[in-house]
Image (cartoon, rainbow, N blue to C red):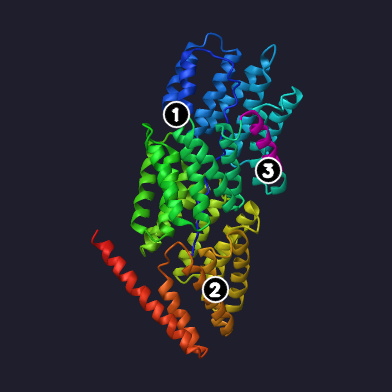
Amino acid sequence: MSRLALQICFVLAFVLGTGAIACGSVLQEAEKAASAGLLQTADVLFRQAFAELKDPGTIEAVVLHNDYGQVFQSEWRFDEAEKEYRLALGINRALAQPVAAELAASLNNLGSLELSRGNSASSETFFKQAYAVLKDNNLLHITTAGKIISNLAVTVEKQRRSAEAEQLFEQGASIIRDTKGEKSVEFSRLLANWACADLDAGKYGESARKSERAVAIQASSQPLNHRELASTLNTLGLAQMNAGELRTAISSFERSVSEQRSLTELGDAKLAETLGNLGLAEYKRGLFDSAKQHEQQALDLLPHYVGNRDFLQATILNNLGLVSVAFKDARAAKEYYDEASRKWIAAGATNDIRYAATLSNMANLEGQAGHHKKAASMLQNALQIQACQVGLEHAEVASTLANLAAQEYFEKHYDTAVSLYEKALRIQEKTLGPGNIEVARTLRNLAISEVGTKHLEDAADHYGRAMAIVEHSNEPNVLQASWLREYASLLRRLDKFAQAEEAEVRASGLEVRNAINAEKTSFR
């Protein structure tokens, strides 16, 4: 029942250089390579540009340090990125006439870096300082201001100040719309940022719509930035996956992988992340062999990567644990979960929502082993983390509540299980929509618990609602036939024999169809 949402959606760091300063063809080539997503090539060129720089105390050096820091940040080399941004800031402030736009750029970059590290409060401070620099210099009408405001909106959303964040996004969008237009790359970056914020807030439909708009703009831009387009496609896939649209999510992740593989550089953390997401979507859809293959590919990429890989490695290990459970290999699953947990702890990320997902998955494994009290305790810990990070009205919280309900059910605490499933159901219907497949799962489990409390009519009603969702879903549900058998058995207990027989006939048809499909697959 675990529904891990892999939400490593990093804020797009806007390049905020004025564009008016040219300090040699090498720097221009470096910036061009960075814009195209060729980070390793850009790294080499930036080093050459530094070697050719005649005066390290000029505005040219400021631009160079800011741009070079962007490369490090894209590679998750956060300490090196911070060093470059702070050097740019220090050099600029020491100038006889500091350049306000580049001061704002450095502060914005430091804010984006803190956001990538998960430090929302400190990132907000930097973004506000960047905004103040532009305001003091009467520059709030320029594109840079719109970019900074949208970044500020992201960090405000992460602190669950949604109304304030929405206003900031609208303000930033208005500036960029006026200065660059709605078809510009700059506007697509704002949309992608906004989509990430919606994703973190559990607004999956809104995130998908904004991502689709951003993808359309980025795919038609020249020159095409494969890395940037791939990042937005990855966000789109995450939104679709969390909304239960698994087929379209897989397509988005596959397209993202294709865009990234069109680059010549290896050891890319973003490619590993996207492969991990693709594997997770395949796992959710029951494509366990493909899921295992893609998760292993993601893990194999990491030794080539020079940046900080603990967070990503922990997430992939967590996904491999899920796949191992699907293959009924509890020992391998435990090893993967334990290693993932050690990574989170070593990284000091025990308050991260992704660590909560690992805890939840470990708890489910303990529950399968019959250790329900231990599992419940672990799930309570996961809930505390989630409540602090995303609030109580989030789909991840609903998932953990449903997992906790299952432990109570197996302990034969049926009334408690019903109460927890009802709480999970209310959140899911609000955040995911009443027709989501995860709502169907919770309805079915609620029905089973109500059978335990002898409320058979309520159970039959919830079974019926679950089956209606499954039948109208675009996603095949391998459990549909077994759910129909359960439903038919309950209907017979209620003396509704005609309805029971109808359900059994439908179940038989599905079982035959599933068997034929399985046979076809085995001959491919």
Across and down, in percent, residue 140 comes to: 72, 28
- The answer to whether residue 334 is seen in the rendering is no
> What SS does tag 2 mark?
helix
Across and down, in percent, residue 106 comes to: 62, 26
- State the residue position of label 2: 465
Q: Residue at 35%, 62% (x, y): give it.
A: 327
Q: Residue at 51%, 48% (x, y): give it.
A: 344
Nearest the eye: 514 or 486: 514
- State the residue position of label 3: 156
In the displayed orientation, state which residue is furthest to the bottom. Answer: 495
- State the residue position of label 1: 39
Q: Gap between marks 2 and 3, in whole Å?
A: 38 Å
Say what amino acid the circle numbered 1 marks: Leu
Q: How many numbered circles does the render carry?
A: 3
Q: Gap between marks 2 and 1, in whole Å?
A: 51 Å
- Per the rendering, the mark at residue 210 is none
Please tell me how crowded label 1 is: few (under 14), some (14-19), or many (20+) other residues with Cα within 10 Å: many
Across and down, in percent, residue 201 comes to: 62, 51
Circles 2, 1 touching at the beta carbon (< 8 Å): no
Left or right of 512? Residue 170 is right
Is residue 170 part of the magenta span, yes or no? yes
> What SS does tag 1 mark?
helix
Q: Earlier in the sequence, mark 2 or mark 3?
A: 3
Q: Gap between marks 1 and 3, in whole Å?
A: 29 Å
> What SS does tag 3 mark?
helix
Q: Which residues are magenta?
A: 166-180
Say what amino acid the circle numbered 3 marks: Val
Q: Earlier in the sequence, mark 2 or mark 1?
A: 1
Position of 504 relative to 304 (above/below):
below
